């Protein structure tokens, strides 16, 4: 990696970490249990790590990226979101109600039933910042999405 790219990457990662710290402070100061649970679901964090206080520890340099967060809940989720937007809103090949009916009635099998994707809401397909990037799905549900998308 060229030096200028690694500097830019490090700066952007530090920006993400600073944002995460702000979100964590929001979570810790939440006045109700409902709000704490909401922030936990939105931010994906529930408490501060003791590593944050360790000297010479930099979360941007010492934690590896993992496939669950980067691919399943990141790249794949965005790709499926854009594909669904395209085929539902632009091409009209599929309707959201038909898709949700298939999600609910598909036979997932014993080992996948607990990871069955939840229904997709119209707001989940919005491209604005308030819409969840992962369509409201967890990593295991996104893995099933990938599996079934490749089959069809």
Image (cartoon, grey):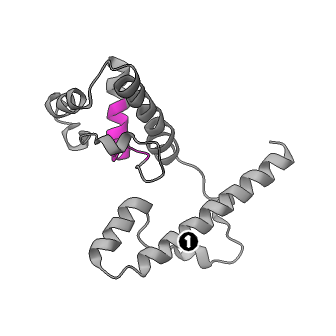
The x and y percentages for residue 99 are 24, 28
Residue 7 visible at all: yes
Task: Point out the image quarter for the N terminus.
Answer: top right
Residue 44 visible in the snapshot: no
Residue 140 magenta: yes
Tell me where residue 94 sits by quadrant.
top left
The residue positioned 85% from the left and 48% from the top of the image is 3
19 is higher (above) or lower (below) than 69:
below
Q: Position of residue 151 (x, y in %)?
A: 33, 18
> Mark 1 falls on what kind of element?
helix
Mark 1 surroundings: few (<14), some (14-19) or many (≥20) residues within 10 A: some
Is 17 drawn above or below residue 1 in the view shown?
below
Q: Is residue 31 magenta?
A: no
Does residue 19 appear to the left or right of 129 in the view shown? right
Q: Which residue is at 40% across, 31% downward?
A: 85
Q: Which residue is mark 1?
A: 21
Q: Which residue: 35% across, 47% down?
A: 138
Residue 55: where, in percent of width, then height?
69, 78
**Residues drawn in magenta:** 133-145
Q: Is residue 146 left or right of residue 115?
A: right
Which quarter of the image is occupied by the C terminus?
Answer: top left
Q: Does 93 sit left or right of 64 as displayed?
A: left
Please provide percent x and percent y for residue 142.
37, 38
């Amino acid at each position: 990696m060229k030096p200028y790219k690694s500097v830019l990457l490090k700066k952007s990662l530090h920006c993400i970490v600073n944002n995460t710290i702000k979100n964590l402070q929001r979570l810790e100061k939440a006045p109700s249990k409902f709000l704490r649970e909401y922030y936990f679901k939105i931010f994906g964090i529930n408490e501060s790590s003791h590593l944050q206080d360790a000297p010479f520890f930099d979360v941007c340099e010492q934690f590896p990226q993992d496939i669950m967060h980067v691919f399943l809940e990141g790249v794949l989720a965005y790709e499926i979101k854009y594909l669904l937007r395209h085929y539902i809103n632009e091409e009209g090949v599929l309707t959201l109600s038909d898709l949700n009916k298939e999600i609910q009635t598909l036979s997932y099998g014993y080992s996948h039933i607990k990871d069955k994707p939840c229904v997709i809401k119209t707001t989940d397909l919005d491209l604005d910042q308030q819409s969840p990037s992962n369509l409201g799905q967890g990593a295991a549900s996104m893995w099933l999405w990938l599996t079934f998308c490749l089959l069809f």
